[in-house]
Image: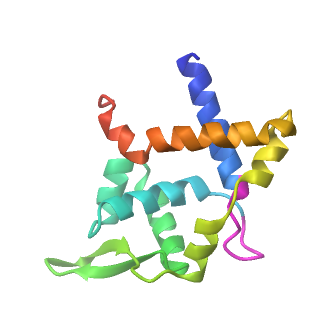
Amino acid sequence: MSPVELILLGRTLMKIGEQALPPAAPDAPRGGERTVVVVMSDVYQHPETSVVEVARRTGLPQSAVSTAVARLREVGSIVAEPDPSDRRRQLLRRNPELTARRREVATARIDEALATALDEPAQLGAVLAALEILGQHLTPEAIARLRPQ
């Protein structure tokens, strides 16, 4: 597999994942899920962090991080508190309570979206098994082992 093929596969997998996510609300617009997941993951890995720090680490524009943080606060995935050393700044962290939305997202399955995307739906089991193996070995922490760009 070439680097280009890997990038295209990654993009396809992201789109399937986005499709499999349950909407935040029945009338909620789709879109921005990837940014929300990236921001949530960063906040969970770096508690007591700020929007500026998340933007620096992820490479996302600060406005996109702020929008994602607002959505995550709205659904209860993260909480923000004033920074004791600079009351103008908010520090973000994972909400210790398991909200209904977090439970819904955590238990969502990809099977239906993946089967729809496959040109041979009979291969669903094999593809799910392959994704499980990749998920065990290529965790978000794996990114830190890559050379800086």
Q: Position of residue 115 (x, y in %)?
A: 81, 45
Quadrant location, the N terminus: top right
Q: Quadrant of residue 147?
A: top left
- Can you name the residue that lies furthest to the top here? 2
**Residue beneath the point at 33% across and 31% down:** 146
Q: Tell me, what colour scheme is on the image?
A: rainbow
Q: Position of residue 110 (x, y in %)?
A: 70, 54
Q: Is residue 148 above or below residue 64?
A: above
Judge left or right: residue 69 versus residue 50: right
Q: Nearer the viewer, residue 119 or 11?
A: 119
Q: Position of residue 47 (x, y in %)?
A: 29, 67
Magenta segment boundaries in residue numbering: 19-29
Q: Is residue 108 above or below residue 55?
A: below
Q: Nearer the viewer, residue 132 or 47?
A: 132
Judge left or right: residue 122 versus residue 97: right
Q: Nearer the viewer, residue 109 or 51?
A: 109
Q: Quadrant of residue 46?
A: bottom left
Q: Is residue 91 visible?
A: yes
